[in-house]
Amino acid sequence: MNWKDRCFLSLDEEKLFEDSGHRTRFFELLDCYGDYPFFTRGLCKCMYLSAWDEEHFAIMLETLSAMSLGRETDTEDMRIQGDPLAEVQPDAEYYVYQLSNSFLDNCTFTLPQNAKIEPEQRRIIEQALKAAALIDSI
């Protein structure tokens, strides 16, 4: 079994997908882009996070499509765009983008205790951090 399959199955076994849509969107991203030279564990974590809903999935799909057409070999350009994108996001979205940036940087992310976000967004971030730990262990 290859790494992509183990990753997907491990996330599924740990029940880290919110619903069948989340599972399907993540699988599509992993299946389509998991063999490109720019694919990393950090990007895989971003894929998991972006697959949470249709809106973020579409953004990730567009980004990865452009990277594949541009024959990118790393996520450097994606990461450079991350900070300016985070800065223009309202409240909770800011933290989601910061989490993505930390995944690409392979750095630890801690949500500030005083972060003013809804419980649902906090849950998304917490689940993404659990998935990230699992991805790192594979």
Image (cartoon, rainbow, N blue to C red):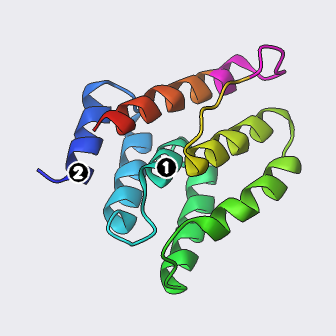
Q: Considering the numbered disc 1 on the image, is that residue within a helix, a strand or a loop?
A: helix
- In the rendered view, would you say 84 is above or below 138? below
Q: Position of residue 30 (x, y in %)?
A: 36, 57
Q: In this view, which residue lies farthest toward the top?
A: 113
Residue drawn 49% across the image and 49% down it: 42
Kind of residue indicated by mark 1:
Gly
**Can the viewer see residue 54?**
no
In the picture shown, does residue 29 fall above or below 62? above
Disc 1 marks which residue?
42
Q: Which residue is more in the foreground, 58 or 103?
A: 103
Please tell me whether residue 120 belongs to the stretch shown in magenta: yes
The residue type indicated by label 2 comes to Trp
Residue 127 located left or right of residue 27: right
Q: Residue furthest left?
A: 1
| Principal secondary structure, stretch drawn in magenta | loop
**Would residue 51 be found to the left or right of residue 80 on screen?**
left
Q: Is residue 44 above or below residue 60?
A: above
Within 10 angstroms of label 1, few (less than 14), some, or many (20 or more) residues? many
Of residues 69 and 62, the one drawn nearer to the viewer in this rendering: 69
Residue visible at 49% across and 84% down in the picture: 71
Which residue position holds label 2? 3
Image coordinates for residue 107, horizontal then vertical, percent: 59, 39
Asked if residue 27 shows in the view, the reply is yes
**Taking 104 as reference, is 131 above or below it?**
above
| Disc number placed over residue 120 in the picture, else none | none
Residue 138 on the magenta span: no
* Label 2 CA crowd tier, 10 Å (few <14, some 14–19, many 20+): few
User: In which quarter of the view is residue 108 placed?
Assistant: top right
- Residue at 79% across / 40% down in the picture? 94
Place of residue 48 in the rendered image (x, y in percent of width and height, measured from the top left): 47, 44
Magenta segment: 112-122
